[in-house]
Amino acid sequence: MGIISLYSWIKRKRLKILAHRGLWRLPEEKNTIKSFKAAFTSGFGIELDVRDNNSKLIVNHDAFANSKDNLLLSEILQIYLNTSSSEYLAINIKSDGLADEIKGLIDHFNIKNYFVFDMSIPEQLSYARVGLKFFTRVSEYEPHPIMLEESDGIWVDAFERDWYKNDLLLDFLSQQKKICIVSSELHGRSNNEQWNFLKQFKNSKDIMLCTDKPNEAKGTFL
């Protein structure tokens, strides 16, 4: 197998890594142009937080966002196109009533590899109705995913402990669902045991890992 075909196989059959709020070293670099551009150019997807502020869609985790520092979602999508990235965008919904606006931007920029997640159940219906790809979620506190059949995938979270087993993930995969797993360090725990468990899925193109440590994850899984 030549170098080019081998690279194509790796790109086609591998666990995908999402850089949580971009690729950053210092906390203040999260959700910034620098962190997102670094993630895209390094071959990672991203997770980013979107809310409305003064009738604009901004990228910010905090409810009381400082307006002078706000990035527009449209800016990030333009950077995504400019870097020719095709990795996944995980859009964490922080406000209600954004479905139509997000749909307009996704269509305008012709984004294919994305999903929205973390909205309320009524909002989930709104996103489904406008035809956006959404992930439902499961955790130790939410054992039954809502609208699983209609969803494009499942956001698998573990707030207190790594509660899920491989049978659950295999069941979701058998239903043709993509899976994004929250890395344990996002909840202040070591990820060593979790990442060792996930190595069995490292050649699955339908599993993603959302992590604060994408470069370490690349060394582990790719």
Image (cartoon, grey):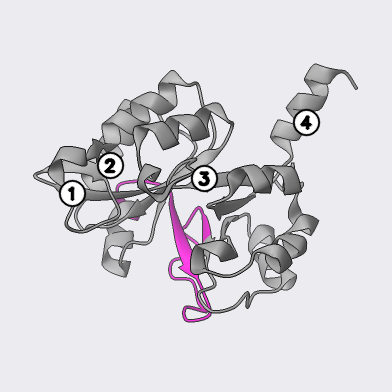
Is residue 219 left or right of 79 when viewed as pictured? right
Q: Nearer the viewer, mark 3 or mark 2?
A: 3
Q: Contact (CB < 8 A) between labels 2 and 1?
A: no
Q: Position of residue 105 (x, y in %)?
A: 28, 34
Q: Position of residue 71 (x, y in %)?
A: 25, 37
> Which label sits on residue 9?
4
151 within the magenta span: yes
- Specify which label sits upstream in the sequence, 3 or 2: 3
> Which label sits on residue 52?
1
Crowding at mark 1 (Cα within 10 Å: few <14, some 14-19, many 20+):
many
Q: Which residue is mark 2?
A: 102
Q: Position of residue 159 (x, y in %)?
A: 50, 74
Residue visible at 74% across and 26% down? Answer: 8
The CA distance from mark 2 to mark 1 is 11 Å
Q: Which residues are magenta?
A: 128-154
Quadrant of residue 44 within the rendered picture: top right
Residue visible at 77% across and 46% down? Answer: 203
155 within the magenta span: no
State whether residue 162 is above or below residue 103: below
